[in-house]
Image: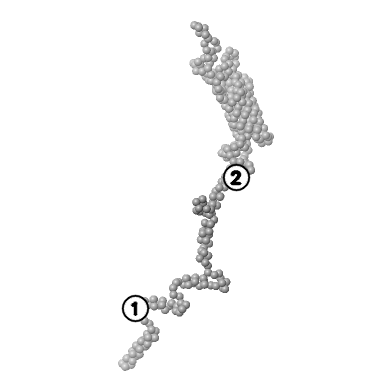
Amino acid sequence: MLLNGLKARAIFATAVVLILSAERVSFAEGESYTEQLKKEIEPKGPGARTQGSYTEEFKKKLESRTAVEGEPEAATPAEAQGYTERLREDLPALRAPSPNGGVENSYLEREKKKLESKSQTGAIAAVAEGKSDLSLKKPGNISRAFGFRYGVASLTRSYSVSGSPGAVGFSSLYGANYVPEVSFLYEMQLFHSEILGSLGGVALMGLSYFSGKGIMSSQFADPRTGAPYSSTSKTTFQLFSVPATFALNYRLNILHYVRPYIMAGPTVVASLESRSDSKPSGSGLSYAAYLSFGASILLDWMAKAANWDLYMDHKIQHSYLTVDYIQFIPLGGAIKAQSSGVFVGFTFEY
């Protein structure tokens, strides 16, 4: 039994030695098993890969394909560039040279300047500035108007008190001084047509201011020399006149640019006279007929931009320069008021 056990061990040891010899496994000093395995995996022979990754080897194979296989030849360095890179290199050729020989602006910058040089105004602004053949359309019906007038020429006035035949005349007391006179109007139009015209009820309120020195009713002389004293008093007089009128106004619009009109109605004139001495002030009412005729000159075409702004901000359709002759014809009252003259002003319809 012991002999048999020794024989078995000897046979097993011999087998192990033979297997190790057959496999020729030996590790160099300082090398790991993984490094030895990599050496075994690397291909051998003249065509074996010695450096570079698998991806690099695959790219080399693609570049080496021939035209016989229906594939294009390997791209040149310029062709290997992307489209964006090649386009970026071509852009300098499209740039305009500057006076100093350099490149002034890129193609995109030059095109941007062309766009910016175009007019930025819209259609409405172009029409308002007269740069378009289009016409402005102002929706909405005209039903009202307002305006003002100022007396400028041929102004004559006469105020007298009933039952005072010896009183100093109005022109003697106030006629030598400048008299500002202004009136304001507001109109409600019963109908409006650009062809047939417009008819409206008008309310007018005016204001006149007069000032002057009193006039002596009797002439006095210096008892020592007999020379007459001045007939001008030291007393200062001020007269405020406020006429209020309700009238009908008809304006003929068929001529468009020049629109004649006539206006008539009753007037009440309130007058207040004050004086600088101790005597009381006087006041009174007078009644008169108001008559006016003149023309409204259309201003829309002269300032289209301003006219459009008026419409956008205040809904004003038409603007007019008015020139008219106004007359007050006295009818009665404690004070007899009569006046006439040429007035200039502006009227706005909306």
Tell me the kind of residue under disc 2.
Answer: Ala
Dot 1: element: loop
Q: How many marks?
A: 2
Please state, as top left, top right, bottom left or bottom right, where the N terminus lies in the image.
bottom left
Residue 111 percent across, percent down from the top left: 55, 52
Residue at image position (53%, 57%) is: 93
Residue at image position (44%, 72%) is: 52
Query: Relative to 105, does residue 136 appear above or below in the rendering?
Result: above
Residue ID for mark 1: 29
Q: How dense is the environment of label 1, judged by Cα within 10 Å: few (below 14), some, or many (20 and up)?
A: few
Q: State the colouring used for the structure image.
A: one colour
Residue 109 percent across, percent down from the top left: 52, 52
Looking at marks 1 and 2 on the same chain, the residue that comes earlier in the sequence is marked by: 1
Residue 205 percent across, percent down from the top left: 58, 27
Tell me the kind of residue under disc 1.
Answer: Glu
- Front-lying residue, 17 or 183: 17
Does any portion of residue 256 appear in the rendered image?
yes
Closer to the camera: disc 1 or disc 2?
1
Residue at image position (63%, 34%) is: 298
Left or right placement of residue 24 versus residue 305 in this view: left
Residue 348 percent across, percent down from the top left: 60, 34
The tag on residue 269 is: none
Dot 2: element: helix
Distance of mark 1 from mark 2, alpha carbons? 92 Å
Residue ID for mark 2: 123
Please state, as top left, top right, bottom left or bottom right, where the C terminus lies in the image.
top right
Q: Name the residue furthest left.
A: 2
Circles 1 and 2 in contact, beta carbons < 8 Å: no
